[in-house]
Structures are given as C-alpha cells and as structure tokens.
Image (cartoon, rainbow, N blue to C red):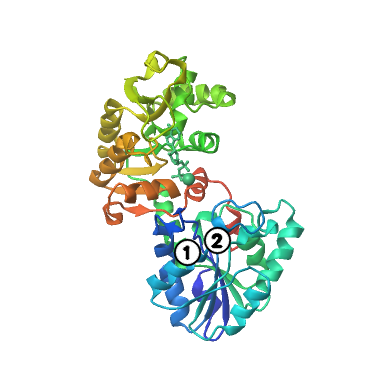
Amino acid sequence: MALRTLDSLGDLSGRTVLIRCDFNVPVQDGRITDEGRIVASLPTLRALLEQGAKVVTMSHLGRPKGAPDPQYSLAPVAERLGELLGAEVAFAADTVGEDAQRVRIGLGEGQLALLENLRFDPRETSKDAAERASFAAELAAGADAFVSDGFGVVHREQASVFEIAQALPSAAGLLVERELGVLARLTESPERPYAVVLGGSKVSDKLGVIEHLLPRVDRLLIGGGMLFTFLDAQGYGVASSLLEEDQLERVRGYIADAEQRGIELLLPTDVVVAAAFAADAEHETVAADSIESSRFGADGIGLDIGPETASAFAEAIRGSRTVFWNGPMGVFEMEAFAAGTRAVAQALTEAEGLTVVGGGDSAAAVRQLGFDDAAFGHISTGGGASLEFLEGARLPGLEVLGW
Ligand code: ADP
Ligand code: MG
C-alpha cells in the first residue's frame, strides 16, 4: 500500500483540518533557540491555508508530566509561527477544553490556530490504547480531516499521531513525504562508501540501531556519549564519563561483528576530558586508553572527541558518497566541547554525494555552530524517527496512513 498524501483528502476549502506538527523546538527563557522545525512545517500549512481550509495545528513540546506546566507552553511557538506565516495564529490555552472549542469555532477559511501542548493531557502518551483513543476522539470532534506532518513523532503510537488518524479521514503532509523520500535514498541503494556517524546522549536507544546498520554500511563512526561504552568494552577505563554497563556485552558483539563483516568501525583515539560537566570546567585532551590517567583521575568526564579523532572522522566522511549523521560528537552546547561536532559538520558540508543530518540536537548543533542548512543534502526534523526508519522498524504513525 502507498502512503496517503494530501490530495487524497480532496477539496479542503471551508473544511476544518487538524494537523499534527512537530513544534518540539528548544526553548530557553521563553525564547526559541532553533526554529528549524517550525520552518519545516510551513509548506504544508501554506498549502492548506491556500486551499481555504480552517487549520488547527497541534504539537507537543518537551516532556511535561501529563499536566499543564508553563515552561512547556507552546505560546512562544504560536507567536513565531505567526511571524513566519505573516498571519494571525489563534492560540488555545488548552487542547480539548473550552478554549480550544472557542478558537476552533472562531476560525474562518484560510485561518490558523494552534492548540496548547498535547502532553499536558496524560492520555496523549498513555500506554492504554483506550485512553489514547478517548483523547483522539475529543481532539477529532468538529474536525473534517487529519494531516500527519510531525515527522519527528511518526514512530510513536500516541493519540495525536496514531489513534487520531483512525478517527478521521487522514493523510501525510508534505514534510513527512519529503523526509521519507530522502530516507528511502539511504535505504534503497545508497552510493558507496556509505558512512553512518553516531553520537549524542541517548546511548541505549542508539545502540540498537547499530545492529541493523552494520549489514548496510561501509563505515561506522562512533562519538558522543556512547563512545565511552565502546571504550570500556575494549577494556579502557572511562572514569566518570557516560557509561551504560548493561550494554557492554552487546557492544563487544558489535565490535566483533563489524570486524567479521569487514566494516570500518572508527572509534575515538583521543578524547577531551573535563573536571566537571560545566562550560568553564578545566579540561585536557588524552589518549582514548588513558582517560583514567588524566589529571582529573576518577572524576574526569569525557565531553568531546579529541582533535586527532576529529580529523580522522572528517577524512572518513569526506571520502564517503553517502553520509548519515545523528547525534553530536560532544557537549556542543558548551564552546569548549564543540570542536568535534564542528569538525564533523564541516566534513559533511565538504563531502560529495548525499549528506543527511538527523536529530533535534544535531540539527540545532549545526545551526548554532553557524552552518547554513543549504550546505547539507537534508536536515531531518526527526532523530528517533529517522533512525527507526533506517533500522527498518515499523512506524505506527506511517502505517496508519497506508504506508
Ligand atoms: P539528537 O537529538 O541529535 O538525536 P541526542 O538527543 O541523542 O541527539 O543527544 C544530544 C545531546 O548529547 C547533546 O545535548 C549533547 O550535549 C549530548 N552529548 C554529546 N556528547 C556527550 C558526552 N560525551 N557526554 C554527555 N553528553 C553528551
Ligand atoms: Mg535529542
């Protein structure tokens, strides 16, 4: 079956269309620090508005605990979205309450609203399908169609992604279509050499991906928080660095598997070790097998790949024809530990062939470090979703759209 796209919904003029976007942007002190995901949602929103639909957008932001929490309000997104669209965005202070109803009823053709954070309702992410379905039914009330355009959440079985698509005539938006098109190029017949660069902090999440990628890639580069589990698996101490001890056996298996398959597994040969997890912490570069001998001893925390590793990674990336990168190489948010991430990003911009950056923090990193979006083949709005796609996992939010 094929993914149902916007045109399958027919003429939407005068119709109330509910659209799931991924406006989960980083917010600091009420300011949006990377608006990439909002910008990425604009083509579909414009297409719906131009058709004269009454558009009700919805999203989550961060991880509130199933109850309203002002620090996770979508109000700053409503404001920025309005500026970007050059149109007024009616903001509802709830999702299925009186205010949402007021806002929806007040919408004219070609007008747009945004509901408050979906995760203020515990049913959005409930493990109980009946609870999710009840939330979806309340969201769907008064709407004529549902558009799924939050690519970053299509791997989630959540009320606003999955159940809602069963409650209304539904289709994928333009962003989801575009993301899938690029990722398909990575899975179908990538130009070789094909390199995957992994980093970030969600170690156990990402280790699973390696198993599925090993048979497909030519080069696997490991940085970020997960590198320490690899170093420890080789018998090197990692002091106070991020370590997932329960994954050591698994990681040893990957190292052996890579060797047997003749895959180039690039692990760091040097790391930047700091006295503490802080922007102004003292730090030094040491060999990857000598982390415990840094001057910080057992307190040392590895916060970035070292310069030797960064140049080896950059060379491997520049010499590849297809590159997928997910997860910063270090704690790029702190300038002292951003060099590894900067070097990898720079190398992607220099590589010929298709380069794809996936992941919320990775995308934020390249922009924060001053790179232009256009210097990359594609910056995906979805980290977990793109990894699961590459793994060949089933993505509930796409299956429900006929994919
Ligand atoms: P993405 O959103 O791109 O998928 P993740 O969410 O997995 O990436 O990880 C991003 C985070 O990983 C960043 O905030 C970064 O500071 C952190 N990180 C990278 N390297 C390390 C490290 N060595 N120790 C701790 N955190 C790290
Ligand atoms: Mg992240």
Lateral position of residue 43 relative to residue 112, left or right: left
- Tag 1: amino acid: Pro
- Callout 2 environment at 10 Å: few (<14), some (14 to 19), or many (20+)? many
Q: Which disc is residue 76 wearing?
A: 1
Give the x, y percent position of residue 95: 63, 68
In the rendered view of the protein, which quadrant contains the N terminus?
bottom right
Give the x, y percent position of residue 7: 50, 75
The residue positioned 26% from the left and 52% from the top of the image is 375
**Residue on which the image places disc 2:** 73
Give the x, y percent position of residue 281: 37, 29
In the depicted view, which residue is nearer to us: 94 or 175?
A: 94
- Callout 1 environment at 10 Å: few (<14), some (14 to 19), or many (20+)? few
In the rendered view of the protein, which quadrant contains the C terminus?
bottom right
- Tag 2: amino acid: Ser
In the depicted view, which residue is nearer to us: 231 or 364?
A: 364
Task: Give the Cα separation between the discs numbered 1 and 2.
Answer: 7 Å
Q: Is residue 359 visible?
A: no
Give the x, y percent position of residue 214: 45, 33
Which SS class for mark 1? helix
Question: Vertical placement of 399 versus 340: above or below?
Answer: below
Which SS class for mark 2? loop
Question: Vertical placement of 384 versus 134: above or below?
Answer: above
For ligand 1, give the image quadrant: top left
Q: Which disc is residue 85 wearing?
A: none
Question: Vertical placement of 2 versus 384: above or below?
Answer: below
Question: Vertical placement of 294 versus 50: above or below?
Answer: above
